[in-house]
Amino acid sequence: MNEFAGRSQLAFRVERGSVQKGALSLLSDLTVTIGTGRVVAVLGPGGAGKSTFVRALVGRLRFGWNRA
């Protein structure tokens, strides 16, 4: 069941996304779904890709998709 069915609309969704810089893979096989009006925290250890994810989210890096 879709957790957003009948509630808020999707603001952002990536299925099996990736972020690369040149030949270097920064994030791979990333799946994220964020609903409109949701507050989201990105947590993880140093070097896990939190800042890279946020940079891609705001458009400073480009997401690539295996399936979007």
Image: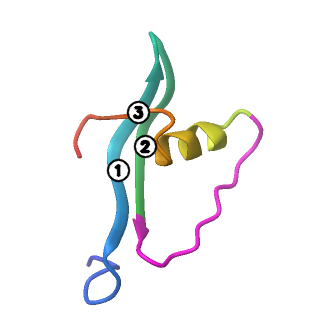
Q: Quadrant of residue 45?
A: top right
Residue at (33%, 70%) from the top-left corner?
10
Q: Residue 16's spot in the image, x, y percent? A: 33, 42
Q: In the image, what residue type sits under mark 2?
A: Leu
Residue at label 1? 14
- Horizontal and vertical percent for residue 17? 36, 39
- The circle on residue 62 is 3
**Dot 1: within a 10 Å radius of its alpha carbon, few (fewer than 14), some, or many (20 or more) residues?**
some
The answer to whether the residues at label 2 and label 1 have Cβ atoms under 8 Å apart is yes
| Cα distance in 3D space between marks 3 and 2 | 13 Å
Q: Which mark is residue 26?
A: none
Mark 3 residue element: loop
Q: Residue furthest bottom?
A: 6
* Image vertical order of residue 43 relative to residue 2, above or below: above
In the image, which residues are magenta?
A: 34-46
Pick whichever, 24 or 56, lies toward us.
56
